Amino acid sequence: MNNKKQEPKTDIVSLVMIGGILVGVAIGYA
């Protein structure tokens, strides 16, 4: 697997996933 930033979508998806996890954790701790 050799993707050197060929798809910027993957970065957006990963950011959204990380953001969702952070929001879930924040809600869990709230």
Image: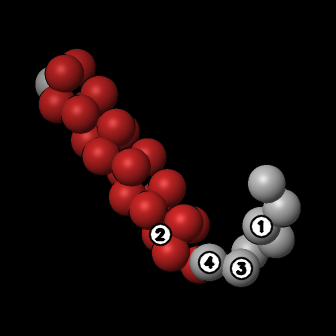
The residue that disc 2 covers is 12
Report the disc number at residue 3.
1
Q: Earlier in the sequence, mark 1 or mark 2?
A: 1
Q: Secondary structure at mark 4?
A: loop
Vertically, is 25 above or below 23? above
- Give how far apart the Cα atoms at labels 1 and 2 are: 15 Å
- Give how far apart the Cα atoms at labels 2 and 3 are: 13 Å
Report the disc number at residue 7.
4
The residue that disc 3 covers is 6
**Residues at badges 1 and 2 in contact (C-beta under 8 Å)?**
no
- Give how far apart the Cα atoms at labels 1 and 4 are: 8 Å
Give the amino acid at mark 4: Glu
Q: How is the image coloured?
A: secondary structure
**Residues at badges 1 and 4 in contact (C-beta under 8 Å)?**
yes
- Give how far apart the Cα atoms at labels 4 and 3 are: 4 Å
Location of residue 12 in the rendering, given as x and y in whole percent from the top left corner: 47, 69
Quarter of the picture holding the C terminus: top left
Report the disc number at residue 18.
none
Location of residue 19 in the rendering, given as x and y in whole percent from the top left corner: 37, 50
- Give how far apart the Cα atoms at labels 1 and 3 are: 6 Å
Give the amino acid at mark 1: Asn
Left or right of 12? Residue 3 is: right
Q: Secondary structure at mark 1?
A: loop
| Front-most of residues 10 and 29 | 10
Give the amino acid at mark 3: Gln
Q: Judge depth for marks 1 and 2 and give the one in front.
A: 1
Q: Secondary structure at mark 2?
A: helix
In the figure, residue 27 lies in which quadrant?
Answer: top left
**Residues at badges 1 and 3 in contact (C-beta under 8 Å)?**
yes
Give the amino acid at mark 2: Ile
